[in-house]
Amino acid sequence: MSGILYVVGTPIGNLGDFSQRGIETLEKCDFIAAEDTRVTLKLLNRFGIKNTLVSYYEHNKLEHGQIILNRILNGENCALVTDAGMPAISDPGEDLVKLCLDNGIKIESVPGPCAFTTALAISGMPSQRFRFEGFPPVDSKQRKDFFDNIKEETGTVIIYEAPHKLGKTLGDLFDNLGNRELAIVRELTKIHEEVIRTDLFTAKEKYGNNELKGEIVLIIHGKECSENKMTLDQAKIIALDLIESGKSKTDAAKEAAKITGIKKANIYKEII
């Protein structure tokens, strides 16, 4: 008789968030499939759990996924964990879950913290309808497609980003989406947890040097929720402020157009 694949959520920061059921599952299963065995070993040691770890991550998922499947088919129970949060959410565990389902394996959930839903809950952004996109691609063509696909989204958009890539992503978001309300949520459940309510223009100017540290979730207002209803006079003032800060008239008109939604040519006429 086949075993069971348990999908186990682990803490995203504060270890006090680990559920008693999660602890018991990691104790009783036959082995644990972990994204990074070194990270998971620290968790096991913290709770006095002794069990066998098998690595399962993006670059070995094809080979190790089959090995894990065979063990479950032979009657062993496996717990799938990621470094932090729920496995299979923007995570290669998605492929293991599908592989097991395709082979008739029973899947059981052991829910735990999830970064993007936690961030949304404390962001103050609309949550009735949202779109989670994970990490933006690095490849230039895929990255362009990524931003093209979300710029017309009317629901709240949620993405993850690494701190050393934050400046580029904020710039790309502004260049492709124009100005939108934004919440930068970082270091969830940790000592320095923070929610920064701002907008894309201000954020790219203030945080473009990648000074923010820790795990980051970006929560962006959807298109309809953030349409600007500014006047031409307000756009002119923004453009003049940009010129005073060192921008050329052309660049100032272009950025003011993105911020206000008013045509660049109309703004440019007001400042020449």
Image (cartoon, grey):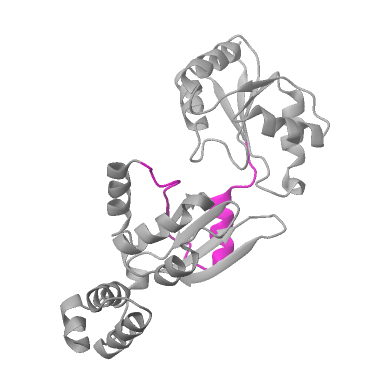
- The residue sitting at 53% across, 59% down in the picture is 120
Residue drawn where x is 39% and y is 70% of the image: 201
Percent position of residue 180, x then y: 38, 69
**Whole-percent x and y of residue 107?**
57, 27
Q: In this view, does 129 lie above or below 86?
A: below
Indicate whether residue 127 is drawn in magenta: yes
- Seen from this angle, which residue lies furthest right? 48
- The question of residue 86 being in magenta is answered with no
Q: Is residue 214 above or below residue 33?
A: below
Quarter of the image for the C terminus: give it.
bottom left
Tally the marks.
Answer: 0
Query: Image check: 269 left or right of 217?
Result: left
Q: In terms of depth relative to the viewer, which is nearer, 272 or 1?
A: 272
Residue 176 in the image: state x and y as whole percent: 30, 60
Question: Residue at point 35% right, 84% down?
Answer: 244
Toward which corner of the image does residue 53 lie, by quadrant? top right
Q: Residue placed at 50% from the left, 14% from the top?
A: 66
Instruction: Name the image quarter holding residue 42.
Output: top right
**Where 261 falls versus 35 (above or below)?**
below
Viewer-side residue, 126 vs 57: 57
- Residue 194's place in the image compared with 215, above or below, is below
Residue placed furthest toward the front: 246
Q: What stretch is highlighted in magenta?
A: 110-138
Quarter placement of the N terminus: top right
Closer to the camera in the image, 55 or 249: 249
Residue 57 horizontal/vertical position (percent)? 53, 27
Left/right placement of residue 244 relative to residue 213 reads left
